[in-house]
Amino acid sequence: MTAAPLRFGILGTAKIARSFVAGVKLARSAAVVAVASRDAARAQDFAAELGIDAAYGSYEQLLRDPGVDAVYIPLPNSLHADWAIRAAQAGKHILCEKPIAASAVEARSMFEAARRAGVLLVEGFPFRAQPQTLRLQEMIAAGAIGTVRMIQASFGFTLAQEENIRWSTPLAGGAVMDIGVYPICLVRMIAGVRPTRVTASAQWAGTDDGVDRAVAATLQFADGLSAQIACSFDACLHRQALIVGSAGVLQTTYLNHTTATLPGSLQWRRGSDARAVDSIIETPVANGFQAEVDAFVAAVRHDPAQWSGATAEESIDNMLTIEALLRSARAGGTPQAVDGGAPP
Ligand SMILES: NC(=O)c1ccc[n+]([C@@H]2O[C@H](COP(=O)([O-])OP(=O)(O)OC[C@H]3O[C@@H](n4cnc5c(N)ncnc54)[C@H](OP(=O)(O)O)[C@@H]3O)[C@@H](O)[C@H]2O)c1
């Protein structure tokens, strides 16, 4: 017998929530049954347009709906912690948009609340559920490029709108929070541990208390692995990663794609010298939200250990890394320890 779909409610009528609904419609494992907005009319319009049964004029009302099993949180980053904790206390599983929170302290409280309530809380990164990333992980684990020594990863796009949550310091915007978190997550996934020391330089939006608009950084690991990451709101759209090992190179053309229409591909160079052989590995097309939601439902229904995305430890490390990068950038590029201690 097929299990009934897991019933999702959405907090807020965010732009990205439309892509989420489209992805869930492709997934048989889940359905979006409710949406809430600070404005009841906005919730009703969103629900009518996207075929969602229930519309609420407050997030609290949605959390009281017994017909909702899980919530998707695409709120501004500064609100993730508060609403994830309230959702956990209401007994809902939580798929929270990246970055998980506005700080590592908040992230720890969120996972503690979820543990106490016995619900699943994860940070959403659709690329972590997509075939090109799963294949990348398998290949690295199987030794396809030997020991990983260097990673370069970046993500940028042009943020032309003047009014956007990403420009807001109180809403925890900024380039590192918004898109730097992708290469940070990819590097942490491959390294398997948190970096020990980082340095960063940034360009800032407006005055001194403006958010970062572009950041270039280095991340160093205890075992000698080093990574360079970059992110920018002033670049053409690109998402790229180059992973260099002792015996080969892997390159992935994108780190995230929620409405994929092209198959993901990996370029693989086998060999450590000029005789290296190049090949392209095609991976299937998969909508990122569909893949993410299917993985989320499997983790809720069967085994949280099946979750292929960021673990709680990884999400907390991602926040510690973001904080250390911003500390370094604000201190003119001075090295920072990721755990907040003296730099090693
Ligand atoms: N996974 C991905 O590919 C992806 C892509 C884009 C964004 N994201 C993440 O998704 C989240 C939302 O991004 P977005 O660009 O979709 O945001 P957005 O369009 O600006 O939507 C944010 C929503 O939050 C609600 N909200 C509550 N308090 C607010 C406040 N003080 N100011 C503004 N909005 C407020 C609003 O809904 P109501 O007014 O209806 O309550 C609003 O529609 C962020 O965490 C971002 O990092 C992820």
Image (cartoon, rainbow, N blue to C red):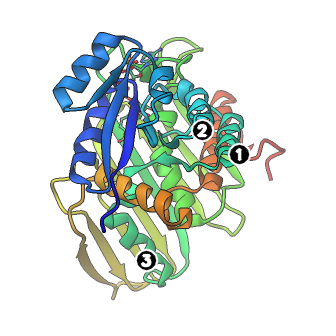
Q: Dot 1: within a 10 Å radius of its alpha carbon, few (fewer than 14), some, or many (20 or more) residues?
A: few
Q: Earlier in the sequence, mark 3 or mark 2?
A: 2
Classify residue 14 as left or right of residue 317. Answer: left
- Residue 324 rendering spot, x and y as whole percentages: 67, 40
> Which of the four quarters of the rendered structure image does ligand 1 lie in?
top left
Q: In which quarter of the image is residue 85?
A: top right
Q: Earlier in the sequence, mark 3 or mark 1?
A: 1
Image point (65%, 39%), residue name: 110
Q: Is residue 109 above or below residue 25?
A: above
User: Which residue is label 2 attached to?
Assistant: 88
- Residue 296 rendering spot, x and y as whole percentages: 43, 55
User: Which residue is label 1 attached to?
Assistant: 116
- Residue 57 rendering spot, x and y as whole percentages: 39, 14
User: Which residue appears farthest toward the bottom when viewing the image?
Assistant: 275
Residue type beneath disc 3: Glu
Dots 1 and 2: beta carbons under 8 Å?
yes
Residue type beneath disc 2: Ala
Image point (57%, 40%), residue name: 91
Q: Which of marks 1 and 2 is nearer the N terminus?
A: 2
User: Which residue is label 3 attached to?
Assistant: 138
Q: Is mark 3 on a helix, strand or loop?
A: helix
Image point (55%, 78%), residue name: 147
